[in-house]
Image (cartoon, helix red, strand yellow):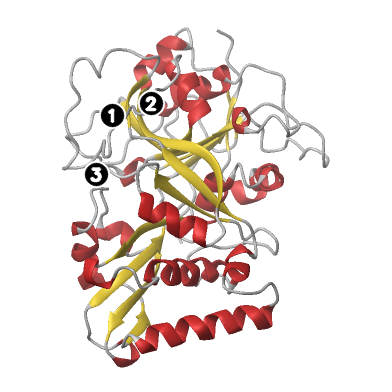
């Protein structure tokens, strides 16, 4: 198989975002991951699109490409966000090319990059955890359709069940995956309209109505404190580390006036890819609409200045929000729909076998181009921490 060139993007906001932003919302997870306010020194941004490739004119087909954000220091949490032009809908200008070589070129290149010293000893380096990967991409890597009911709730972290030999049987380079998650999309302004209006004045009226509900219940707005990270982690099967939660924008509701020392009763975070994550309302407080209020306030942070939500460079008209909801989670689906969320596509978290990806590519890793990368990858591209 002939593989395309893999390019490093040491300055992806300058060289890659101009190609991804016109393709919103399909590129949303990777766009937000690049806009996240704090980037690890272990991060790498790779693409089969050259850094100096000019953006496509409006309405013109995008050239076929794939791109990824990789940070293996995040293990056992999501290590990689991946986008392929395979994900574009039939109605969009679509490149007429086989997407598999672009995907395999990137994945086969990952083992050439340095592994962080703190990488978990219990996790084989040849396995890579992809996050929010589009169904079409996962099926292409698996070489077979994914059954509607297939998958597990959790596939990483201490609570993940071990895969059986039957589940480990080869399916392309995919070795395990979660159940399907429905991607809900919230267009810019959707949250405001769901609250009762389209204009800023009407949005403020919705804020006042929500505040009246909160105060009527004796609650106050707050953020999640470091001492409460263990509580958050205990309420979900999905692995969440305090190290990550400390970096994320959050909104919470607690008992007591003025955000005092009362107990936290509802909360949510914006994940590093800008998605709603860890939304939770304590059982005794459910049925009062608190999940919708917390979500609306959290998503509103994206349009209220850089830094408050943990993302930088979100332009006017680009304030798309999104959430990934397990297809059997009726409560969260109701919250998403009630806020005006539109069903986008199904996505998964999946383990890929990097050695098998290299074998599928014919044993080649393609050419290496771009900046800041030596022939053996030891000087691979990174985004400096800030």
- Label at residue 125: 1
Residue in the foreground of this view, choosing between 156 and 124: 156
Give yes or no for contact between labels 2 and 1 (Cβ–Cβ under 8 Å): yes
Task: Residue at 59% x, 10% y: name it.
Answer: 2
Pick whichever of labels 2 and 1 is earlier in the sequence. 2
Location of residue 62 (image quadrant):
top right
x, y percentage for residue 50? Answer: 67, 32
Tell whether label 3 touches label 2 (CB within 8 Å): no
The foreground one among 95 and 139 is 139
Q: Residue 9: in sight, yes or no?
A: yes
106 shown above or below 276: above
Looking at the image, is 377 positioned above or below residue 280? Answer: above
Q: Which residue is mark 3?
A: 118
**x and y percentages locating residue 346 in the rendered image:** 48, 37
Is 67 on the left-hand or right-hand side of 127?
right
Q: Secondary structure at mark 2?
A: helix
For the residues labelled 1 and 3, say whether their Cβ atoms are less than 8 Å apart. Answer: no
Query: Can the viewer see residue 11 in this picture?
Result: no
Give me the C-alpha separation between circle 2 and circle 3: 16 Å
Q: Which label's residue is closer to the chain start, 1 or 3?
A: 3
Instruction: Please tell me which residue lies in front, 20 or 346.
Output: 346
Left or right for 31, reference 250 = right
The residue beneath circle 2 is 111
Residue placed furthest toward the bottom:
257
Q: CA distance from mark 2 to mark 1?
A: 8 Å
Q: CA distance from mark 1 to mark 3?
A: 12 Å
């Amino acid at each position: 198989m002939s593989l395309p060139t893999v390019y490093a993007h040491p300055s992806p906001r300058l060289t890659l975002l101009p190609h991804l932003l016109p393709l919103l919302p399909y590129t949303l997870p990777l766009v937000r991951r690049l806009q996240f306010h704090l980037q690890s020194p272990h991060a790498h941004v790779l693409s089969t699109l050259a850094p100096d490739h000019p953006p496509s004119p409006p309405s013109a087909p995008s050239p076929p490409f794939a791109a990824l954000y990789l940070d293996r220091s995040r293990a056992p949490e999501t290590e990689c966000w991946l986008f392929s032009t395979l994900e574009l809908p039939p109605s969009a200008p679509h490149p007429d090319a086989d997407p598999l070589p672009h995907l395999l070129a990137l994945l086969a290149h990952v083992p050439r990059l340095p592994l962080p010293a703190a990488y978990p000893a219990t996790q084989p380096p040849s396995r890579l955890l992809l996050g929010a990967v589009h169904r079409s991409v996962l099926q292409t890597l698996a070489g077979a359709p994914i059954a509607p009911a297939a998958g597990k709730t959790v596939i990483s972290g201490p609570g993940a069940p071990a895969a059986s030999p039957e589940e480990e049987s080869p399916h392309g380079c995919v070795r395990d995956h979660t159940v399907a998650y429905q991607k809900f999309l919230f267009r810019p302004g959707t949250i405001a309209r769901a609250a009762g209006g389209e204009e800023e004045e009407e949005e403020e009226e919705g804020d006042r109505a929500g505040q009246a509900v909160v105060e009527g219940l004796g609650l106050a707005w707050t953020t999640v404190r470091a001492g409460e990270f263990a509580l958050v982690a205990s309420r979900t099967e999905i692995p969440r580390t305090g190290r990550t939660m400390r970096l994320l924008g959050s909104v919470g509701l607690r008992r007591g006036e003025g955000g005092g020392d009362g107990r936290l009763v509802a909360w949510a975070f914006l994940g590093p890819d800008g998605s709603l994550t860890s939304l939770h309302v304590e059982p005794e407080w459910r049925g009062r609409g608190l999940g919708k209020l917390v979500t609306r306030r959290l998503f509103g942070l994206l349009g209220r200045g850089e830094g408050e939500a943990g993302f930088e460079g979100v332009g006017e008209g680009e304030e798309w929000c999104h959430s990934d909801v397990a297809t059997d989670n009726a409560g969260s689906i109701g919250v998403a729909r009630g806020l005006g969320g539109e069903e986008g596509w199904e996505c998964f978290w999946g383990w890929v076998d990097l050695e098998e990806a290299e074998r599928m590519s014919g044993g080649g890793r393609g050419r290496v181009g771009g900046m800041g990368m030596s022939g053996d990858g030891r000087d691979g591209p990174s985004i400096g921490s800030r």
